[in-house]
Image (cartoon, rainbow, N blue to C red):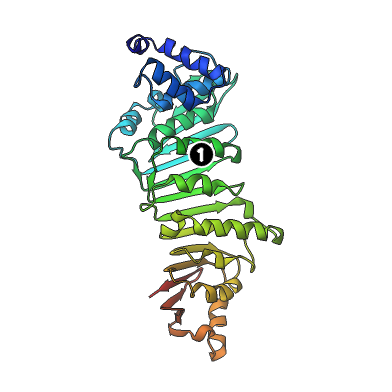
Amino acid sequence: MAEAFANDPIALRQVIAYEALGNVPPFDGYKKMCKRIGDGLIEYIDYEFWYMRFARGEMDMQFDGRLMMHKVSPRLRTCIESMDPKLKRLSFKSGKEHSEINYDFTDVIYRQGKDDGCLVKCTHRKKIVSIPNSNHFELALHDISVVFNNPKLHLESLYICVDADKMQRLQEILERGGIKIKTNRVEFHTVNSTEEAAILPCLQSGTLENIIIHMREYKNTKTDKLDEMRERIRKLNEMMECKESKMLTLHLDFDENFPIEQLLNCRGLTLRSNTWRWFVSASTILIQSPVLETFVFDIYDSFELKEAIRNNGNPLWKAVETQDGIFMIEGLEQVFKLGISISRIRLTRQ
């Protein structure tokens, strides 16, 4: 029986359609099919691709839209499916009308067209592929899942920016293969305060050095979000990925009530603010951290901060100024070096 299905992909897709229309959960259906007609006929990633199409009512058995980068860039196919992919930088962005994947310096763009179709283009080729009855996000998601499921993949940088309503589906793809993604650096945007819980656990601990989070929900935030922010920062501080990374960078607006005490498990921390005054009180807390190695704070009025630390000859924290803008401060266990440049403060454990 297995041989018959191996030579007849349409028959295999009909079996998948039967399970999808019967609302059988995809992984359960996949296991049932493997048990009935044999293992190895189809990978789960391909099974789920067809299952999702049929579940949406897209019943074209001849559809050939899987892995669109195969069509628009044969060079990418060889690179991505090889045992040792050479990809270093990977970016995935998706909005309302289009999705985009950047493989190093090659872009594959999926744009929603007319009549529920999708137009796919690779920047290295002039050819545009038109895929009828398809969704730009699902096509891009399928392609990038092939990359993520390669156990040899080790990225230097991973960037993710998708609409909030797509995050759950992306999380399913990240978790599905059971393979932790190896990357030295990850950068992503948040809107509904749950993205870090969806993305960070899917990354390989021990390889992740830099985490950059753009917290859009805390742009121009007011004090009515303080309790929510405090609890969220506390959970972030407890995540193993944040504890083990060398630097956590948070892009958000905050005031003097920002809960810096919730981030004392970080080895490295970078924040940005429009005022130096917050740093004066926060640094007293930071230098008590037993694990903090580096704190970077971007500001726009560093001259005022230097004068405040000097405090007319009675320096704050009994700091010793070794040269202009360089102060030595005694912490809980070790001495910290505080360097103040034109627009950046760097506090470093010595």
User: Would you identify the image quadrant in which residue 32 lies?
Assistant: top left
Q: Name the residue under label 1.
A: 171
Q: In which quarter of the image is the N terminus?
A: top left
Residue 179 point in image, percent of width and height: 38, 39
Question: Does residue 67 show up?
Answer: no
Q: In this view, does 274 lie above or below 34?
A: below
Q: Is residue 194 above or below residue 132?
A: below
Quick check: 127 left or right of 169? left
Q: Is residue 88 above or below residue 254?
A: above
Q: Which residue occupies the extreme bottom position in the image?
A: 313
Badge 1: how crowded within 10 Å, few (<14), some, or many (20+)?
some
Residue 336 point in image, percent of width and height: 43, 77
Give whichever of 314, 269 is nearer the camera: 269
Q: At 47% across and 59% down in the image, what residue appears? A: 248
The amino acid on which the numbered mark 1 sits, given as a three-letter code, is Gln
Q: Which residue occupies the extreme left position in the image?
A: 83
Q: At 30% across and 29% down in the image, what residue appears? A: 78
